[in-house]
Image: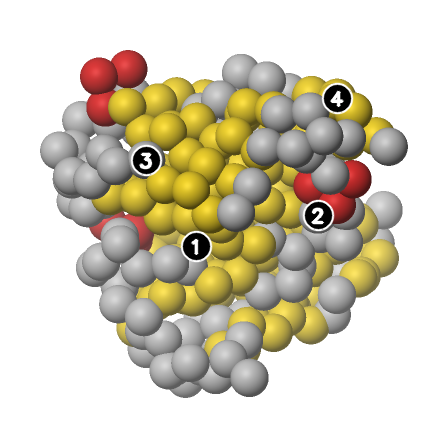
Amino acid sequence: AQKVTQAQTEISVVEKEDVTLDCVYETRDTTYYLFWYKQPPSGELVFLIRRNSFDEQNEISGRYSWNFQKSTSSFNFTITASQVVDSAVYFCALSEANQAGTALIFGKGTTLSVSS
Amino acid sequence: EAQVTQNPRYLITVTGKKLTVTCSQNMNHEYMSWYRQDPGLGLRQIYYSMNVEVTDKGDVPEGYKVSRKEKRNFPLILESPSPNQTSLYFCASSLYPRSSYNEQFFGPGTRLTVL
């Protein structure tokens, strides 16, 4: 069965520190998609990135980077030089190509607190 | 502006009093879905709809109903709310129902408290 595990419930860092949020997934499908969402204190869900199972290229977007490794079923998210505005709950999610309803299977989230 | 809207954003009600949370999208998306978010559990899908008049259960459908009479609207109905339905609810939509690649656009959320 499909599953997403975010083992880190809460992480606290000081501004300018680098931080990595871990995401491990389980799926039997060969075609699937991985996502990261950010939920700031205001509550909305902000889409950050999508990666399909055939594209293991790492991606960098400003201070954000993602490391996708199929061999370890992981899709980790790193924030470089963290800022207070990065404080939020971050969700990793999985969607399988053959799954009816195209539901997103979410991890339980990692709460990141960045202090100044 | 392309968006998913939900109303109300906040609601406090009492056990057993029927309520409806509306969801509307202006992107002509075929697929719509409802999720609930609870502390420590992440988001879980309640119901989804592949298109008008086509709805199906997600992972946690008990105590909820939905309808999809128009493409843009997907209301969530709680016929007899109970305290365990206190949660943060999100509506989402995406362009194609059978493409998991599509990004799901989320509404702003509805915080429901059932006393």
Q: Are marks 1 and 4 in contact (CB under 8 Å)?
A: no
Please report, as a chain letter, where disc 4 is located.
A
Relative to residue B38, is residue B19 depicted above or below?
A: below
Say if residue B51 shows up in the picture: yes
**Residue B79, can we see it?**
no
Identify the residue at image location x=48%, y=72%. Answer: B74
Secondary structure under tag 3 reads loop
Amino acid type indicated by mark 3? Asn
- The image position of residue A44, as x and y in percent, is 66, 56
Label 4 secondary element:
strand
Type of the residue with mark 2: Pro
Q: Nearer the viewer, mark 4 or mark 2?
A: 4
Q: Do dots 1 and 4 share one subunit?
A: no
Of the 4 image quadrants, the one containing the C terminus of chain A is top right
Q: CA distance from mark 2 to mark 3?
A: 24 Å
Where does label 4 land, which residue?
A: A12
Q: Please tell me whether mark 2 or mark 1 is closer to you in this view.
A: 2
Label 3 is found on which chain of the structure? Answer: A
Name the disc covering residue A40, or none: 2
* Residue B33 image-quadrant placement: bottom left
Q: From the viewer's perspective, is A17 left or right of B77?
A: right
